[in-house]
Image (spheres, rainbow, N blue to C red):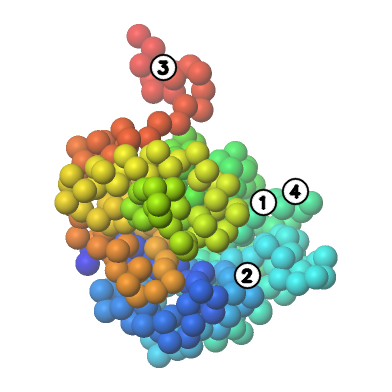
Amino acid sequence: MEYRTVGSTGVQVSPLCFGTMSFGAEADEATSEAMYRRVRELGINFFDTANVYGGGRSEEILGTLVAGERDDVVITSKVGFPMGADPNAQGLSRRHIMQAVEASLARLGTDRLDFYFVHIFDERTPIEQTLHALDDLQRQGKILYPGVSNWAAWQIATSLGVSAREGLAQFELIQPMYNLAKRQAEVEILPLAQAENLGVITYSPLGGGLLTGKYRGGQHGTGQPASGRLVENARYADRYESDHALAERFAAFADDAGISPAALAVAWAMGHPGVTAPIVGARSLEQLEGSLSALDVEMTPELRAQISALSATPAPASDRAEVLTGRWT
């Protein structure tokens, strides 16, 4: 396996990151362990979790699994979403970050997190306060590098400026949504990451299952299988409500290419030059194998361009596209 460097950190990670959101929720401990053993067998050393996943169970299960090889794996976790009814058990205040990181370290059974993401943007807390808290955690050795998920490019850029101005640890890894149906990250987030040499791990490469081929026709021609995230989760159903025609086109393209839709979708995300590693997750070992097959796909620039043509390219950040590209003469 060819490992990739996370931005300017020097940390080497596998080209796929294994996401453990299903641990302790859709996947029980035995299934979680089977999936963990499988990805480690392939050389995957990058694992993503969050304090909110499974109400903390994801961190606990992952911590048990990595206990014998903690120094051989790279672990991320996150802070921001509510962890209880207490109004202060959420957000990016110094108070909550300091409490949340201790709880995550305890659940994971480790003394440090390789990357620690802020999971949301907190409008109630100044960016400076959040960055100072993360800088303190890095100085204490409890986190090695700060990361950011679900922030807009302007918010990330603002934080980088604050970190530079005040001599604080800066975000080294970002985590946006990115798949063939949701390409907004191409407009500003991925270019920002490339310009600033930030690592990028993207989530939802399969579009909540939309790009796996299972929604092609569906049961009785409805385009809806009996189960799946787009059927069972209203948030995902709303997110991809208008993208079922794309799913049909993509599945047909994958058939013609002789590649499974899941493998092709993950390989497409992995093929963007600004992406360090897409995050793949699953509810079962069988489901996981489809995403892992992306490692065997040769994603040439030509193939990626053909796949990209199946969905709409997002509009540029400025109507003056010639200024953005430098082609104004």
Q: Secondary structure at mark 2?
A: loop
Labelled disc at residue 123: 4
Is residue 245 placed above or below 122 in the rendered structure? above
Q: Secondary structure at mark 3?
A: helix
Q: Secondary structure at mark 1?
A: loop
Is residue 171 placed above or below 292 in the rendered structure? above
Label 2 – label 4 distance at C-alpha? 20 Å
Q: Earlier in the sequence, mark 2 or mark 1?
A: 2
Amino acid at the residue labelled 1: Phe
At x 47% / y 63%, what residue is drawn? 227
Does residue 247 show up?
yes
Cβ atoms under marks 2 and 1 closer than 8 Å = no
Q: Earlier in the sequence, mark 2 or mark 3?
A: 2
Residue 214 at x, y percent in the picture: 36, 55
Foreground disc of the pair 2, 4: 2
Q: Residue furthest bottom?
A: 68
At x 24% / y 42%, what residue is drawn? 253
